[in-house]
Amino acid sequence: MSPTEAARTITGRQPQAVRSALAILEAVAAAGIGATAKDISAELRIPPATTYRLLNLLVAEEYLVRLPDLRGFALGRRAANLAPTPVSTPTAARAVLERLRSKVRWGAHLAGYLGHRLVFLDPDPDHPPVDAGELSRHLHASSLGRLLLAEHDDEPPAGAAGLTPHTVVDPRELTARLTEVRTSGLARQCGEFRAEHGCLAVPVRAPGDGRLVAGLALTGPAARVAAPNDDLVEVLRAHAAELGPLLA
């Protein structure tokens, strides 16, 4: 149903439902990642049945997303369209990216996180990345997505989509991958999002509190990503460390 058709079907009894849906969006935005239906119902004093019904509608319309562990919600792709966040990368940060690109023959991308969504702050113009919305829908299959899932101790989604024959979808194996990301500070995927491509990603952290502010990724042929690449990883980490103070 189009917005115009939906508007024609609104009756005198429905404005309260619209207000409740907007209040739920505000509650999720204020609570951050992981707001639960029970918490939202209690905070807004909306009956649980109504809360669940509106949450399901907002998820279906992509204003909200369910977290992979099904224990809560976060803002979805269309919620960002209500008040687009201006993306501005400092000149000094762009200079760091240019220096990295001059040293490697890989695609080098800087991505930020808005809730459980990815947004590219500085994509490599010579190696265009996958659509950020598509990455956000399949966090389990991308290195940048795994950085985000690992940061929030999120369990991998049940029934994760197998995008290629190489995509890891077994929950136990995905959990092991996220544990490895937390331990090593490195996410690696080889042909899991696109069969022919792979990606290495490291977190960009704020100095002081160490919070995740962005992800720095290198993309290339899956076979090259699968190699140890120890020297390359050190170069990636060094540039991520430079970016932290610039983006915090």
Image (cartoon, rainbow, N blue to C red):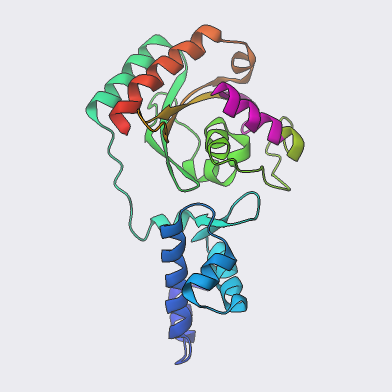
Residue 175 colored in magenta in the image: yes
- Quadrant location of residue 200? top right
Q: In this picture, is 71 found above or below 1? A: above
Q: Residue furthest bottom?
A: 12
Q: Tell me: 234 left or right of 72.
A: left
Q: In this picture, is 168 found above or below 94? A: below
Q: How many marks?
A: 0
Q: Residue at x 38, y 20 (%)?
A: 241
Report the front residue among 28 and 216.
Answer: 28
Image coords of residue 48 (percent x, y): 60, 75
Q: Tell me: 107 left or right of 60.
A: left
Residue 145 colored in magenta in the image: no
Q: Tell me: 193 left or right of 18.
A: right
Q: In this picture, is 180 found above or below 47? A: above
Q: Residue at x 64, y 16 (%)?
A: 226
Image coords of residue 142 (percent x, y): 58, 34
Q: Residue furthest left?
A: 91
Report the front residue among 113 and 163.
Answer: 113
Q: Residue at x 43, y 22 (%)?
A: 108
Residue 167: tell me if it is visible.
Answer: no
Image coords of residue 162 (percent x, y): 71, 40
Image coords of residue 174 (percent x, y): 70, 35
Q: Residue at x 47, y 90 (%)?
A: 11
Q: Residue furthest front?
A: 208
Quarter occupied by the C terminus: top left
Residue 217: tell me if it is visible.
Answer: yes
Q: Which residues are magenta?
A: 174-198
